[in-house]
């Protein structure tokens, strides 16, 4: 049973409710302003820094989908600010908008998307989630698990990977490298959560194959 890393904390706080939602109809995807900006950022990186192309992509998305002029101008400003950060920082981007998976041999399998993978000057890799984040992001269960998932995906030692967050306008880049014991503890917590989810899921016919 797949679980998005963005849902993990909600599931942990109320596994019964998460299982019930999983059994219901799939939620409809809402394409919002931040999603349009993320796609424009992805376009910028995938085109090797084509600023004009990224701006045009965002403008086309705005024209097709949105009516709020103030919010539209805001994400355009954010894109320019993000690009300015990239150019000034000299960040080397190894990958962008890539999928991860982590299978620990239990019912739940962690899935999801990471927005950017950097190669910092000091070596190793830095996996970044773009968007709003809480001050307690370092304590979220998903973060050390994502470090493990990224290490697996690229075949790198666990301690060469950092996990981080950054605002969509390129400000407030923060990172953390979790120790092996912290990752192991997160895996244990994830395994226990999976057992709880499985107990609830078995009461719903057809949810577990």
Image: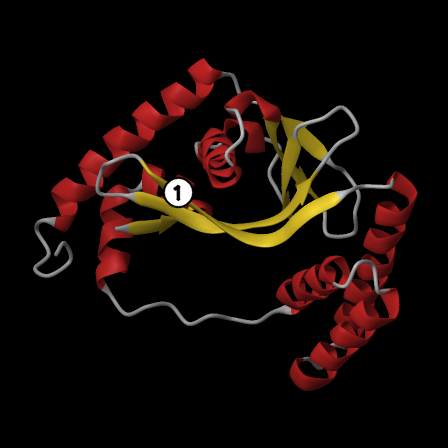
Label 1: state its secondary structure. helix
In the image, residue 57 above or below residue 170 = below
* Residue 193 visible here: yes
Please give the name of the residue rendered at 82% of the width and 52% of the height, measured from the top-left corner.
82
Where residue 57 appears, x then y in whole percent? Answer: 75, 74
In the image, residue 71 above or below residue 112 = below
Q: Nearer the viewer, residue 24 or 2?
A: 2
Q: What is the crowding at mark 1: few (fewer than 14 residues within 10 Å), some, or many (at least 20)?
A: some
Q: How many marks?
A: 1
Q: Judge from the rendering whether residue 208 lies leftward or rightward of residue 86; answer left or right.
A: left
Where residue 151 appears, x then y in whole percent? Answer: 51, 33
Where residue 50 appears, x then y in whole percent? Answer: 84, 65
Please give the name of the residue rendered at 81% of the width and 76% of the height, measured from the top-left corner.
56
**Occupied quadrant, residue 97:** bottom right
Residue found at the far bottom of this picture: 64
* Residue 131 visible here: no
Where residue 78 appears, x then y in whole percent? Answer: 81, 58
Residue found at the far front of this picture: 155
What residue sits right under mark 1 in the picture?
Answer: 8
């Amino acid at each position: 049973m797949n679980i998005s890393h963005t849902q993990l904390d909600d599931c942990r706080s109320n596994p019964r409710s998460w299982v019930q939602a999983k059994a219901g109809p799939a939620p409809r995807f809402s394409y919002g302003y931040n999603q349009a900006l993320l796609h424009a950022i992805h376009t910028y990186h995938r085109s090797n820094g084509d600023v004009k192309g990224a701006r045009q992509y965002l403008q086309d998305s705005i024209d097709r989908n949105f009516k709020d002029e103030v919010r539209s101008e805001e994400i355009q400003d954010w894109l320019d600010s993000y690009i300015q950060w990239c150019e000034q920082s000299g960040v080397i981007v190894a990958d962008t908008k890539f999928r991860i998976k982590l299978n620990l041999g239990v019912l739940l399998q962690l899935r999801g998307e990471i927005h950017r993978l950097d190669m910092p000057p000091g070596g190793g890799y830095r996996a970044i989630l773009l968007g709003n984040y809480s001050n307690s992001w370092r304590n979220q269960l998903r973060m050390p698990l994502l470090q493990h998932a990224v290490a697996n995906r690229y075949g790198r030692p666990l301690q060469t990977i950092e996990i981080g967050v950054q605002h969509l306008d390129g400000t407030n880049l923060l990172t953390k490298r979790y120790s092996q014991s912290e990752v192991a503890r997160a895996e244990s917590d994830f395994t226990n959560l999976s057992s709880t989810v499985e107990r609830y899921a078995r009461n719903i016919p057809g949810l577990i194959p």
